[in-house]
Image (cartoon, coloured by chain):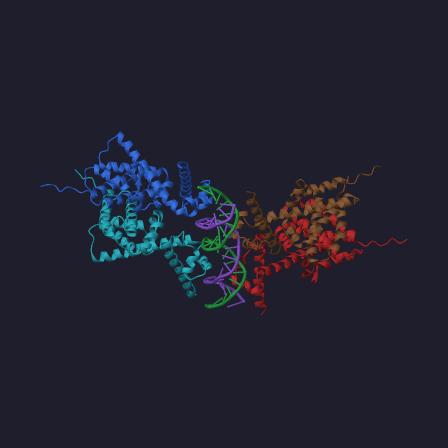
Chain colours: A blue, B cyan, C brown, D red, E purple, F green
Amino acid sequence: MGKIDDKKKQKKAALLKAAYQLYTVKGIDNTSVSEIAETANMAKGTFYLYFKDKYEVRDSLVASQANMVFERASHQLDYLLSEQTPDSAEDLIILLIDTVIDQLSNSPNLLRFISKNLSWGVFSNLQIADLDNRNCMDIFDALLEESGKEYRQKELMIFMIVELVNATCYNVILNHVPVGLDELKPELYESIRNILYQFEIKEAIPV
Amino acid sequence: MGKIDDKKKQKKAALLKAAYQLYTVKGIDNTSVSEIAETANMAKGTFYLYFKDKYEVRDSLVASQANMVFERASHQLDYLLSEQTPDSAEDLIILLIDTVIDQLSNSPNLLRFISKNLSWGVFSNLQIADLDNRNCMDIFDALLEESGKEYRQKELMIFMIVELVNATCYNVILNHVPVGLDELKPELYESIRNILYQFEIKEAIPV
Amino acid sequence: MGKIDDKKKQKKAALLKAAYQLYTVKGIDNTSVSEIAETANMAKGTFYLYFKDKYEVRDSLVASQANMVFERASHQLDYLLSEQTPDSAEDLIILLIDTVIDQLSNSPNLLRFISKNLSWGVFSNLQIADLDNRNCMDIFDALLEESGKEYRQKELMIFMIVELVNATCYNVILNHVPVGLDELKPELYESIRNILYQFEIKEAIPV
Amino acid sequence: MGKIDDKKKQKKAALLKAAYQLYTVKGIDNTSVSEIAETANMAKGTFYLYFKDKYEVRDSLVASQANMVFERASHQLDYLLSEQTPDSAEDLIILLIDTVIDQLSNSPNLLRFISKNLSWGVFSNLQIADLDNRNCMDIFDALLEESGKEYRQKELMIFMIVELVNATCYNVILNHVPVGLDELKPELYESIRNILYQFEIKEAIPV
DNA sequence: GATGAATGAGCGTTCATTCAT
DNA sequence: AATGAATGAACGCTCATTCAT
């Protein structure tokens, strides 16, 4: 019985893989169900045994792809931390963001796909399988916790950081305007530090 | 005959209006030329007398809509300045952005449409008819000039500000996550001030 | 399943038949794919499962129809030869042409269709399935070989004969001008004999 | 009033000229009324003041173009006769055909257009304006008369000659198969002489 | 007479979806 | 479970024709 389930999972995976290739290259609107099935070496009708339509496939893909990015980023972060100690929580967060950006800059299609389809609502609740199903917010939270500092309106703060990163990287990586990624990064990270500082709760100085 | 030209302008305007309604509600990919023509109370063929295809309509709309937003913002800014003097160039820029945001928050469809279709390349070169065809960058530049301060990498700075505003407002206005617009604004404006400060060239303090 | 393949062949045959009817009556330019599908009692989309467009159907038809004519002519010739011996190679060729003409005169639509669409290039290379895939030229060649006579510029000779037959029969059979087929035939055959004689290599008379 | 009639004739002529250019290059089916009017520097609606549809234009063109060919051929023949005397009526006819062929070989579009659209019925009754509105048959007749010889079934004879010339030249000039025009001509003219001889009424030899 | 804006039927083609096998 | 033939609605687009100006 597990064998059959395996086969089904393989079919589903093949469809997802095929769809991802086509979506990122041609866009979802120019991709037909026929093409997805054909690319996955299946008959057209088989597609409908696994997905309602091509939009359900997209939703499934967005979640899994974003998942992978964060899993890889998390592993990369662990690796970096094993080698060197960062100076601060801010450094940690920027390290995390940096590894994410590097992944996206190596795969423009992935960036395009995620940026177009990943809303804040989905993102903030994204469960990361490898990390005990903690979601993205939890991960940021944990990093902030370790700093010993207090922040107000944490979700808004992370939201602003994430949107700033996403929006600027989208243009810079995909269109190379107005500057290159190397030029963007230092300014972007400086701005992130500023945002973090902006939301930091400073202890009243005791008289 | 001016009469005929008038009629043609009306037809074109009707098509643009119809297309705008449909694009904002259903997206351009799910809007057909038939629908646009029907909504504009015309025969399908008439559409093709005025536009090559639905994408030409979109491009025409993006430019004119963004144009309108900036013209209104500019007028609003002039009006506000006639009533009160801002304290600084930073205040001016934030005032400008604030009027833009208010417009967009009053018309979510407009926001959705512009956000989806206005790339940085188009935006930075957008000619504003009412302002002697100066483009958006020129307007920002002029505001910065008046401050008496010097900034490095102006284009990158403006790019980061615009993208931050656009991305955060898109989510907040359209999806009301993670906070409301009233909550976002003060933090957003504080971040903008920080970005401006970040790029400001500080004079070396003479010993 | 042979069953499914059978059904597909039937569908294709039905489309070919429908297209042939429409092409011969209205011409290919005035025949739409919709009509072909409708005439064949199919949905429009089904057409595109079997043919790229209406021109592919035409090419398929031209080949098969011309094929049929020549196969029937060949069989008819065999039959006639079993009953009576022709006096000469010229007689054989004229017999062959006569059986072709008779077929065409019995089916004006076939004549119209073949004449309009069968160029010399296609004709001269037409493979006749029943005759070991020999092409039309081979068949004429074989008949000429048997005569024991030698001909120069055989291809040009056959070309002139075929074109003369085709052009005159087209008018006579379809428009009955300037004479009837019965009146044309003897003169046409006499002309063919003359053309054959014209290209015959006569042995120099030894002194 | 003649002025107005002149203008009308000019418009009609412009439309015919435009249509001829388009028909010969793109074929009548791929030529739209819009294009004809546009090429003739007129509004689309004006076309319909002069012709019922594009097919009426074609019919008008076929007649006038064929007319021109024969007028030119006739003039050319007169000129040649003024320089040298032909040996016989057969020579005359072949000279006439030769001048026609040369015209057609210089203008493949004209050849394609005439061949496709000129049926024997139209041809045989074609009135040649310059030659006292005698038709093509009359011209051939006159040439044959001068020979002093008698021919039976003159119309059939001319029909066979014309069709043989037309069909062979069409392929040779437009497709260069199976031989070139230079190779075709001597054999074609020899065949024409044979056809003329075939229809010649030979006097019974008095005992 | 001349115009050209407007029409809308019709084209070729695609494709999501169904369903008999 | 898997197939893929069949469907037919809908698409983008063209164009002959009309008619108010």
Residue extending furthest toward the left: A207
User: Which residue is pictured at 32% across the width and 36% down the height?
Assistant: A72
A4 and B111: which is toward the camera: A4
* D90 up-or-down from A143: above or below: below
User: Which residue is pictured at 34% across the width and 47% down the height?
Assistant: B120
Which quadrant of the figure contains the N terminus of chain D? bottom right
Q: Residue B38: x, y in percent? A: 42, 60
* Residue C141 seen in this snapshot: yes
* Residue D98 seen in this snapshot: no
Q: Residue B81: x, y in percent? A: 23, 56
Q: Residue B119: x, y in percent? A: 35, 48
Q: Is residue D37 left or right of residue A14?
A: right
Q: Is residue A157 left or right of residue A15?
A: left
* F9 up-or-down from B198: above or below: below
C63 and B47: which is toward the camera: C63
Residue extending furthest toward the front: A1
User: Which residue is pictured at 73% across the width and 51% down the height?
Assistant: D94
- Say which quarter of the image contains residue D17: bottom right
Residue extending furthest toward the top: A83
Residue extending furthest toward the bottom: D1
Total number of numbered discs in the rendering: 0
B69 and A59: which is toward the camera: A59
- Say which quarter of the image contains residue A8: top left
Q: Residue C5: x, y in percent? A: 56, 44
